Amino acid sequence: SIVRKEGLPMLWRGVVPTSTRAALVAAAELGVYDFTKTRLLRTGLFSDSPAVYLVSSLLATLSAIAVSFPVDVAKTRMINQSIGGEPVRYRSMAHCLASTYQERGFLRMYQGSLPSLTRQ
């Protein structure tokens, strides 16, 4: 069992990355949705209709994906880093994100995003 092999705290090793991701997704979705809907209605070109809600929702979802994907990559790396007996490489989410960016570049933060988008 995990508790015997790695200790009780390892049951919660994904809590911080998962909570961070959830907060970023909620902030991006709510903020972008409200901003987009308000701006579209203020133009006078749109009425309060399903089209406004659809466009606002689409942009909110895309922004949430853009914000959360780097965190998903870091979360997966951090959760899997001790599997296989290798030493722990990343000290924190920030360290994981910075290391990934420095070693592999910005686009590596979005590795796997296309398959994820097709599942949405």
Image: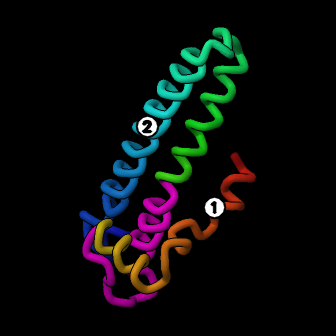
Camera-side residue: 103 or 7? 103
The residue sitting at 55% across, 72% down in the picture is 107
Image-quadrant location for residue 5? bottom left
Image-quadrant location for residue 74? bottom left
The residue sitting at 68% across, 26% down in the picture is 54
Neighbor class of circle 1 (other Cα within 10 Å; few <14, some 14-19, many 20+) is: some
33 within the magenta span = no
Task: Give the image location of residue 57, x and y in percent.
Answer: 61, 30
Task: Give the image location of residue 93, x and y in percent.
Answer: 32, 66
Q: Which mark is residue 113?
A: 1
**Amino acid type of the residue that numbered disc 2 sits on in the rendered structure:** Ala
The region drawn magenta spans 68-92
Q: Residue furthest bottom?
A: 86
Q: Residue furthest top?
A: 48
- Please give left or right for residue 66 compared with residue 54 in the image: left
The residue sitting at 59% across, 70% down in the picture is 111
87 within the magenta span = yes
Q: Secondary structure at mark 2?
A: helix
Neighbor class of circle 2 (other Cα within 10 Å; few <14, some 14-19, many 20+) is: some
94 vs 119: above or below: below
Q: Which mark is residue 87?
A: none
- Please give left or right for residue 72 compared with residue 118 in the image: left
Q: Which residue has dot 2 on it?
A: 26
Task: Give the image location of residue 50, x and y in percent.
Answer: 71, 16
**Amino acid type of the residue that numbered disc 1 sits on in the rendered structure:** Ser
Camera-side residue: 34 or 21? 34
Camera-side residue: 6 or 103? 103
